[in-house]
Amino acid sequence: MTEAAPAVSRAGRNLPVAIAVGLGLGAVILLALYLLKPVFLVVIALAVGTGMWELVRALHVRSLRAPFIPLAVGFACILALAYTNGREAMTVAMMLTALAVVVWRVAEGADGMLADIGAGLLVLVYTAFLAGFAALMLAPDDGARRVTAYIATVVASDVGGYAFGVLFGRHLMAPTVSPKKSWEGLVGSAIACVVCGAVLFETLFARGHWWQGALFGLATVASATVGDLGESMVKRDLGIKDMGTLLPGHGGLMDRLDSLLPTAPVAWLLLAAFLPVR
């Protein structure tokens, strides 16, 4: 008897597996976030650290050797200092990590040095520095609610874009970069983000207003889409389909962080502007 093929959707995913994995990840995130904030900080460190390793390994396809050890140590410092001491300390840690990447690679010899340093700095900014803004959001007393608004709106972008893309997608947005992303999907992402942002700002924050949430949603869909397309361009240049295989139905962790990471500084900035920490 021939085995049934896995249920792959029009968007290229094994939908039941992807939903199950997504729900499991959501449960872990919420449990850590509202149980104890430092526990969530550890979750961020593990998730982004794994994504960093996937990106470093993927760059080997082009013979680019980003030095993982100084990147990992620097990332831990960036995350911890962002949470405990704020953005100035995070920025200093970022600059010192960049210096450490350069020194580490220079010590290994001149062959391919400049390309490897460039790859290391790309990994540093793309993963560690952007993740630091999630720690900045987490630090205030209402940090769990701020992070909830940030993650939930990014998820809304993904879900809305997926649903509208599958149901109505006809006009491709960037066929040479991401052949399954459509303009109709972008409309779905925008609608979902605006609604989600408006509802969350009214329900999570006593000082929040629906129009602030709507603007937050529009900014989120812009940054999430740029992040998604940006990672697709990197993967296409490297000639790979996914950054990893850790998450069935999704790819690697970096494939789930592609929208979250570029949105983190945008979310932090808007939340700080609309809801200043007192």
Image (spheres, grey):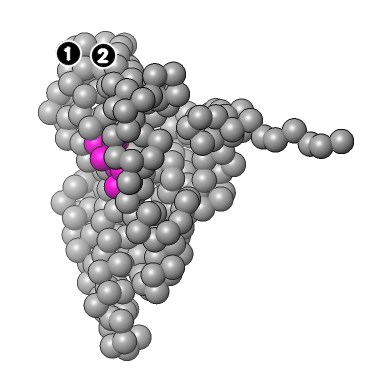
Residue bearing the label numbered 1? 211
Q: CA distance from mark 1 to mark 2?
A: 6 Å
Q: Main secondary structure of the magenta part?
A: helix
Furthest residue in direction right, as rendered = 1
Residue at the location (56% across, 50% down)? 245
The region drawn magenta spans 223-230
Horizontally, is 138 left or right of 210 in the view?
right
Q: Which residue is label 2 attached to?
A: 198
Dot 2, how many residues are within 10 Å of its Cα: few (below 14), some (14-19), or many (20+)? many
Residue 180: % across, % down:
40, 36
**Is 231 drawn above or below residue 3 in the view shown?**
below
Sequence-first disc among 1 and 2: 2
| Marks 1,2: beta carbons within 8 A | yes
Q: Which mark is residue 14?
A: none
Tell me the kind of residue under disc 2. Ala
How far across and how far down the image is residue 14, in percent?
A: 59, 34
Looking at the rendering, which quadrant does residue 188 occupy? top left
* Amino acid type shown at disc 1: Trp
- Does the segment drawn in magenta span residue 229? yes
Residue 115 belongs to magenta span: no
Considering the numbered disc 1 on the image, is that residue within a helix, a strand or a loop?
helix
Q: Is residue 182 above or below residue 123?
A: above
Q: Position of residue 234 (x, y in %)?
A: 34, 55
Q: Quadrant of the N terminus?
A: top right
| Residue 161 in the figure: left or right of residue 205 | right
* Relative vertical location of residue 13 with respect to residue 201 in this rendering, above or below: below
Q: In this rendering, would 25 be left or right of 272?
A: right
